[in-house]
Image (tube, helix red, strand yellow):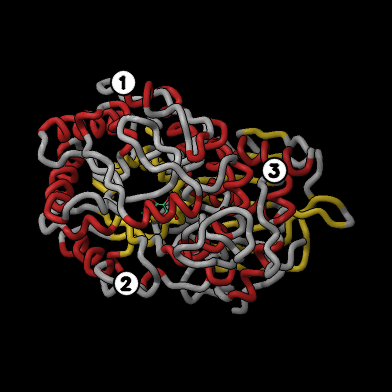
């Protein structure tokens, strides 16, 4: 089947057939369903159209939401629209995704608002479809994070990775180490204001994400990216290592060098490390992991591990083994950036996050493969395609360029199982990270994220060989998300290679 280009759907569903007619949606249309998805649908329709549809547990109804396990795989759904619309979710998540599909189909034509006659059966290719928000380089408050959850869950993302600590700041309160947020959260990059989440704030984010079927993965970046820890507790960290790249960058960008005990306002990396041979360091890690685990219903705690250039290799490996073992002891599955795969005895089952390129360089592929050898699996965040903080074009005002300049087509055209020499079953899915060195506001974040997050959503959700999996099809479909993004206030970048409508 040729994917019907006229269906404005991203990610492309596993299968779709289009009929001739339309189902009018008017102020008298009724929604039937008792799932939270029914109220979410009514609210979204109102934001989009101004129509306030009545919602009831009983029929008759123009749009019916049902649950029926067995109708599709987990998170899957069917959607049939003829003289009424019926969304059947395999589970609550599937129902939520069916509603997102229905909302993408809702269009205004000469006759008013309507849904096209279609028959769709859909379920995700990968169980793991993630986005990451770096709240350490710039802090984003609870309302911003909720907005980010809304816009990404609408693309069927189901994991939100929060990068909660880095050299520039510590962003979540920890009762056992209160000075972290008292002293090391006040600033962001360039001296912009900082901030942090209280435990109630954090729980509010986790609960909100759950209503959109997103699991929150908290990351504390260790043993490097830890200058902020030393601002609060100097005895936990080594002196800053002023490597050549850091000094050169600081001259070129006019950024300050890190000074022990003072908040760091630049964006250099690789200059900080916790003390590997002090037991107090592991008391610290254990307390932090325990308090985060208590607030984390999801299975994962991310322990960092990237770019620890200031930590000798043997020390780094020792730390990786101890830190991942602590996460396991606290009842969670550790996640780590791929460098931690250098540690022979990294905790079994640790999930690696690969951020090398689609053609791996140096030791990256071997490090990533070691997670699989230890019974773990991988999340693919290939930097030259998934990194949402890379510029779209050389002259784009926001973003960096070190991994690549990533236009929408390059973001779209890659295959997560073809990067590393590991079994396909070891690839859990895809995560698209947004590092925030250059983005001060959520509007700026959104310009980098949209439309490229839509490309990664399709890579993660849609069948590899599915109908519609081509750049030509994708660019036509993603262009038709513009009215939805405008209605929801998503500040997307109108990239030149997309025919926006
Ligand atoms: C690399 S790739 C980092 C981050 C930076 C980012 C900027 C990785 C795991 N770490 O510390 O923010 O580049 O693109």
The residue carrying mark 2 is 361
Q: Residue at x 46, y 63 (%)?
A: 402
Q: Earlier in the sequence, mark 3 or mark 1?
A: 1
Instruction: Identify which residue, 209 or 394, lies in the foreground.
Output: 394
Residue 426: give x, y in percent of width and height. 28, 65
> Marks 1 and 3: in contact by CB < 8 Å?
no
Q: Mark 1 — residue?
A: 178
Image mark for residue 371: none
Between label 3 and label 2, give the one nearer the viewer: 2
Disc sitting over residue 489 in the figure: 3
Residue plotted at (73% across, 45% down)? 487
Cα distance between the residues tagged 3 and 1? 37 Å
Q: CA distance from mark 2 to mark 1?
A: 40 Å
Q: Does mark 1 have its CB less than 8 Å from ligand 1?
A: no
Foreground mark, 3 or 1?
Answer: 1
Q: Residues within 10 Å of mark 2 (few under 14, many from 20)?
A: few
- Asked if one can make out residue 493 in the rendered structure from this viewpoint, the answer is yes
In the rendered image of this protein, does residue 353 appear above or below residue 14?
A: above
The answer to which of marks 3 and 2 sits earlier in the sequence is: 2
Task: Estimate the x, y position of residue 158 in percent, counting from the top left.
Answer: 45, 49
């Amino acid at each position: 089947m040729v994917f019907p280009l006229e269906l404005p759907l991203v990610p492309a569903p596993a299968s779709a057939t289009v009929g001739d007619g339309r189902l009018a949606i008017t102020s008298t249309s009724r929604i039937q369903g008792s799932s939270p998805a029914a109220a979410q649908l009514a609210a979204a329709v109102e934001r989009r159209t101004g129509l306030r549809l009545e919602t009831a547990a009983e029929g008759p109804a123009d749009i019916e939401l049902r649950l029926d396990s067995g109708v599709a795989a987990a998170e899957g759904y069917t959607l049939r629209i003829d003289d009424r619309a019926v969304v059947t979710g395999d589970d609550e998540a599937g129902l939520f995704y069916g509603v997102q599909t229905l909302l993408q189909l809702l269009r205004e034509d000469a006759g008013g608002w309507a849904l096209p006659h279609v028959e769709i059966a859909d379920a995700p290719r990968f169980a793991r479809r993630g986005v990451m928000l770096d709240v350490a380089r710039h802090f984003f408050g609870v309302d911003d994070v909720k907005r980010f959850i809304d816009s990404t869950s609408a693309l069927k993302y189901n994991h939100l990775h929060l990068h909660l600590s880095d050299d520039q700041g510590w962003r979540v309160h920890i009762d056992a180490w209160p000075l972290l947020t008292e002293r090391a959260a006040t600033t962001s990059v360039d001296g912009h204001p900082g901030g942090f989440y209280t435990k109630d704030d954090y729980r509010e984010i986790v609960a909100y994400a759950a209503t959109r079927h997103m699991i929150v993965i908290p990351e504390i970046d260790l043993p490097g990216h830890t200058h902020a820890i030393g601002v609060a507790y100097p005895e936990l960290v080594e002196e800053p290592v002023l490597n050549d790249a850091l000094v050169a960058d600081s001259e070129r960008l006019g950024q300050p060098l890190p000074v022990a005990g003072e908040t760091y306002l630049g964006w250099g990396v690789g200059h900080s490390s916790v003390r590997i041979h002090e037991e107090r360091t592991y008391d610290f890690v254990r307390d932090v992991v325990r308090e985060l685990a208590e607030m984390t219903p999801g299975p994962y705690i991310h322990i960092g591990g990237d770019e620890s250039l200031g930590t000798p290799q043997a020390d780094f490996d020792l730390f990786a083994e101890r830190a991942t073992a602590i996460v396991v002891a606290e009842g969670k599955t550790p996640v780590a950036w791929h460098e931690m795969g250098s540690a022979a005895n990294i905790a079994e089952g640790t999930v690696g996050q690969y951020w090398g390129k689609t053609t791996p360089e140096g030791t990256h592929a071997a490090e990533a493969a070691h997670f699989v050898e230890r019974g773990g699996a991988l999340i693919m965040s290939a930097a030259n395609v998934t990194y949402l903080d890379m510029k779209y074009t050389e002259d784009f005002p926001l973003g960096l360029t070190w991994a690549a300049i990533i236009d929408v087509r390059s973001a779209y055209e890659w295959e997560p199982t073809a990067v590393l020499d590991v079994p396909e079953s070891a690839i859990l899915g895809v995560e698209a990270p947004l590092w925030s060195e250059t983005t001060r506001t959520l509007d700026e974040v959104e310009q980098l994220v949209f439309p490229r997050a839509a490309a990664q959503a399709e890579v993660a959700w849609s069948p590899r060989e599915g109908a519609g999996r081509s750049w030509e099809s994708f660019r036509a479909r993603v262009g038709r998300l513009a009215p939805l993004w405008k209605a929801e206030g998503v500040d997307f970048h109108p990239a030149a290679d997309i025919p926006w409508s």
